[in-house]
């Protein structure tokens, strides 16, 4: 490593030279780790003993723009052209009694050793001086990289007690990099999984998404490394901290699907493991604001696909099924293929028939809308219009009335809730 030189852009060299008289500027983290392995990451994290306020002062009349990211953490973004670096002032951290990831107190320091001590794994704790082309490797991270090993910088209990998220980062990085996990690090993580209960659902979801993409992260990532990550979930007993009331999930669907379908596949496998009374209710609990916080739009989409899959397995009637899932069936059917070919063929045949014959299955397929009804029957209450349209759709589907504007408006008179209008 003594003769190794990490590729550094001209702009980053320029930044380091501007700060040279005040302090030495280091690249640290994944960029250094990956460069030592022969490939580069896109994100560059830099660090020095310079505080954010002083950094702003030193770069005030330069081409570099400094934007605060976290004043408490001493983190700023430094931008120039299309390049961006995240600079963090050397710091020590003091945590509260939870494992909630964010330190309770931070203190800026000048000692690089103190800064290294707060980090997670040895492979991420190598500092590279931009101006002096030297490495500072306090925890022998280069050796662990050569051994393809994830190992905590300090005792594993010290690392995990302060920040439960590090357990998920351990799994993800081991899977992405095709590294093994040092025995005491792994065993201690298993004992301290409970620290994940204090991590926000959003952070858990973000890490989970990255794990499901682990096999395509780097050049040396192995096929099916996302399955390795999920198998560690089972072995470590992580699922209960992810709002899943069981310790193990069988990854039948996850092992079968294409890359872009993995999260839905995992949800299907989870539902099979949990076997909830109501799939829709459980998914809203799992993915909602008290769970993984996936966002309302994503939650609605996931629920429709997963519920559509299980409703097909439960052989829901064609009309009722496609009234509910027609817009999403082109996605749902891909999951059915892996489980029940006969059901897939049955529902897909009917789906193709509806498409080819242009049979209305959605309110928007009708030749009238609420405004047409209101105009023709001004005394009809607004709250009844939705029910009227649903009734009309049902009658058109059953071929009891023609999907034509005048016929539909005439039929409105025969609907119960219209009464004497």
Image: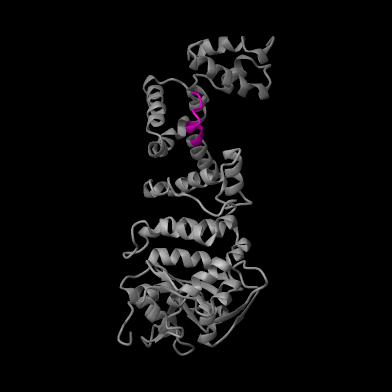
| x and y percentages locating residue 183 in the rendered image | 47, 73
Image position, residue 248 (x, y; %): 52, 53
Residue under the image location 34 percent in, 70 percent down = 40
Where's the C terminus, which quadrant? Answer: top right
- Residue 317 on image: x %, y %: 50, 24
Tell me: residue 197, above or below residue 264: below
- Height in image: 85 above or below 405? below
Q: Locate residue 198 relative to residue 27 in the image: left or right.
A: right
Q: Which of 59 and 302 is in front in this view?
A: 302
- Would you identify the image quadrant in which residue 355 lies? top left
Residue 210 visible in the displayed image: no
Q: Which of 173 and 44 is in front in this view?
A: 173
Q: Which residue is drawn at 45% across and 87% down?
A: 24
Occupied quadrant, residue 353: top left
Residue at 48% across / 68% down in the picture? 170
Please state, as top left, top right, bottom left or bottom right, where the N terminus lies in the image: bottom left
Could you say where residue 91 lies in the image, as x and y percent from the top left? 57, 81
- Which of the 4 image quarters holds residue 413? top right
21 up-or-down from 37: above or below = below
| Residue 384 shown left or right of residue 6 in the figure | right
Does the image show residue 4? yes
Where are the magenta residues, as a range?
310-317
């Amino acid at each position: 490593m003594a003769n190794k030189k990490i590729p550094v852009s001209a702009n980053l060299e320029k930044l380091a030279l501007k700060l040279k008289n005040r302090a030495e500027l280091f690249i640290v983290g994944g960029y250094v780790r990956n460069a030592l392995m022969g490939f580069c990451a896109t994100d560059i994290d830099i660090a020095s003993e310079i505080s954010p306020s002083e950094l702003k002062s030193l770069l005030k009349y330069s081409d570099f723009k400094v934007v605060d990211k976290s004043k408490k953490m001493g983190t700023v973004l430094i931008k120039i052209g299309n390049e961006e670096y995240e600079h963090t002032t050397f710091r020590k951290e003091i945590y509260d009694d939870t494992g909630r990831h964010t330190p309770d107190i931070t203190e800026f320091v000048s000692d690089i050793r103190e800064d290294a001590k707060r980090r997670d794994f040895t492979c991420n704790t190598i500092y590279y001086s931009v101006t002096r082309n030297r490495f500072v490797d306090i925890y022998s991270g280069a050796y662990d990289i050569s051994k393809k090993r994830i190992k905590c910088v300090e005792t594993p209990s010290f690392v995990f007690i302060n920040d439960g998220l590090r357990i998920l980062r351990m799994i993800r990085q081991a899977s992405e990099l095709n590294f093994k996990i040092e025995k005491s690090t792994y065993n201690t993580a298993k004992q301290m999984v409970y620290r994940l209960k204090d991590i926000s659902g959003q952070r858990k979801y973000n890490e989970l998404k990255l794990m499901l993409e682990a096999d395509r992260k780097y050049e040396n990532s192995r096929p099916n490394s996302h399955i390795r990550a999920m198998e560690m979930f089972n072995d470590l007993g992580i699922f209960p901290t992810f709002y899943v009331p069981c310790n193990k999930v069988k990854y039948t669907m996850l092992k079968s699907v294409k890359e872009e379908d993995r999260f839905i596949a995992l949800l299907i496998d989870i539902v099979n493991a949990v076997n909830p009374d109501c799939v829709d209710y459980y998914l809203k609990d799992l993915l909602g604001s008290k769970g993984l916080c996936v966002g309302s739009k994503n939650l609605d989409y996931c629920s429709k696909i997963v519920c559509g899959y299980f409703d097909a397995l439960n052989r829901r009637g064609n009309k009722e099924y496609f009234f509910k899932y027609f817009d999403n069936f082109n996605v749902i059917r891909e999951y059915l293929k892996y489980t029940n070919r006969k059901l897939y063929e049955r529902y897909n045949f009917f789906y193709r028939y509806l498409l080819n014959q242009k049979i209305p299955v959605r309110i928007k397929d009708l030749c009238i809308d609420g405004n047409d009804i209101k105009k023709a029957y001004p005394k009809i209450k607004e709250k009844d219009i939705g029910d009227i349209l649903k009734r009309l759709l049902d009658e058109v589907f059953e071929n009891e009335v023609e999907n034509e504007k005048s016929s539909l408006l005439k039929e409105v008179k025969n609907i119960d809730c219209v009464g004497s209008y």
